[in-house]
Amino acid sequence: MSSLFPALTGGPAERPALCFGERSLTYAGLAGAAGALAARLPRGGRVAVWATPVLETAVAVVAVLEAGAAAVPLNPKSGEKELGHILADSAPELVLAAPGDELPPPLRGVARVDVDVLGAGPAAPAPDADAEDPALIVYTSGTTGPPKGAVIPRRALATTLDALADAWRWTGDDVLVHGLPLFHVHGLVLGVLGPLRRSGSVRHLGRFSPEGVARELNDGATMLFGVPTMYHRIAQALPDDPELVKALGGARLLVSGSAALPVHDHERIAAATGRRVIERYGMTETLMNTSVRADGEPRAGTVGVPLPGVELRLVEEDGSVIPSLDGETVGEIQVRGPNLFTGYLNRPDATAAAFTADGWFRTGDMAVRDPDGYVRIVGRKATDLIKSGGYKIGAGEIENALLEHPGVREAAVTGEPDPDLGERIVAWVVPADPQSPPGAEELADHVARRLAPHKRPRVVHHLAALPRNDMGKIMKRSLSRD
């Protein structure tokens, strides 16, 4: 398989490729730095990357891929126990890091190579790599046990990025801005490798801020990637920031992912800027499955339609396929296509359990499909599907309804056992005014008027903040009645 980044050998040499604050590299500079580093790496091996949000991380991953090896991005915030598990499981031959980075004890037994972003070497020869060879080993969050290493082949990277180029009309003229972590699919694959595969540019903010977004979009950036917490902060800042309004209004594409963007924030951004955020849906194991297309309807609360090459179906609990696209019937999403991972490293049992006999991946996400094929995710099967009074209810739509109440700043919804209903709906609310939080009956009536009486919360807890992970996802397993 040829290089994943054709621009490194035949593209616009002086075009900016990577920009991290005041530090940047053109395509010529990236080719030289990645080529020099790739020459020092084991072909076909595994190489860990200390994935801080700096220029060295991007150069390191490109060099590993150009060498035909597999990169293992490491979250700098991982605890020593988790990091030790990942290193024992993936057994990398080297770790790449920025000069001066102090690595934690679990990494001190791994040979280290510092990344020189000013290195100069010939572009790495096209690796003798097969499309099925591992490109990345990305570890899942480990909510139900130790993190599992999803082995992502070169084929999946190319397929997903090319499908997104089709859906988003993504070209080399686009300049992407974001402030996402680089140890995850969203920030690394879409946010760094995506622009490089298109011969475009990426400007990484280092640390996200609405001010940084406004500065870069008003200085020629065309696309913004973010997670819902980032767009929530943008929505809050818009009324008092005309430069931010101008920036978002002039962007070609605003994309949100990694979790559902509340409809309330969709509407606030659209009202202030005239531009709608589009959403896409993916997972570590599948990369991207669906997206609202650039030429499609940016319908709030949906993640669009399947990307080119992706097959998607909804199934009942017994595995039977739901044939109707009625916008009401809830089923688990299963997907099949060239965007999928090849399996979990050293876990054939987990890999076998993740797939059906005919090769469909069980996502664990619950959704409905509209008659025109748009997918609307209602939550995770394990934490967001509530079976109450004979109904299957998705937590997401109740959360959106709660967020429309002026007294609610943040909201999460879970289910808990109920002797009569099977499960009762529980709302966890961060009030807009902690001194005067909305009452349980008020919120229940609010939801019942907007949705249906059986979807109203029976219990309401008030919190100072919701527990979230690095990507802004609410960690519902951390919510407790205690």
Image (tube, helix red, strand yellow):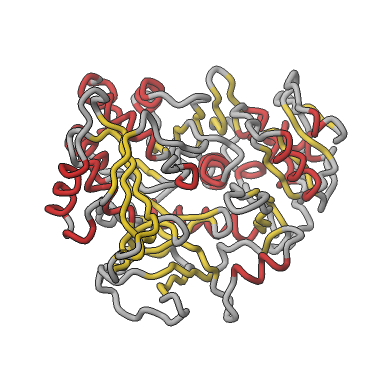
The residue sitting at 61% across, 39% down in the picture is: 183
Residue 425 in the image: above or below residue 393: above
Query: Residue 122: where, in percent of width, then height?
Result: 77, 37
The mark tally for this picture is 0
Residue 125 appearing in the image: no
Residue 340 in the image: above or below residue 6: below
The residue sitting at 54% across, 55% down in the picture is: 287
Q: In the image, is 43 to the left or to the right of 255?
A: right
| Outermost residue toward the front in this view | 419
Q: In the image, is 345 to the left or to the right of 280?
A: right
Q: Which of the image's four quarters has the N terminus?
A: bottom right
| Outermost residue toward the left in this view | 449
Residue 360 figure quarter: bottom right
User: Considering depth in this image, is 111 or 168 the residue closer to the camera?
Assistant: 111
Query: Residue 407: where, in percent of width, then height?
Result: 20, 33
Query: Residue 268: where, in percent of width, then height?
Result: 21, 36
Q: In the image, is 482 to the left or to the right of 279?
A: right
User: Considering depth in this image, is 45 or 83 the residue closer to the camera?
Assistant: 83
Query: Residue 217: where, in percent of width, then height?
Result: 36, 28
User: Considering depth in this image, is 280 or 463 the residue closer to the camera?
Assistant: 463
User: Considering depth in this image, is 168 or 481 the residue closer to the camera?
Assistant: 481
Residue 466 figure quarter: top left
The residue sitting at 25% across, 73% down in the picture is: 326
Q: Which of the image's four quarters has the C terminus?
A: top left
The residue sitting at 62% across, 27% down in the picture is: 55
Residue 257 appearing in the image: yes
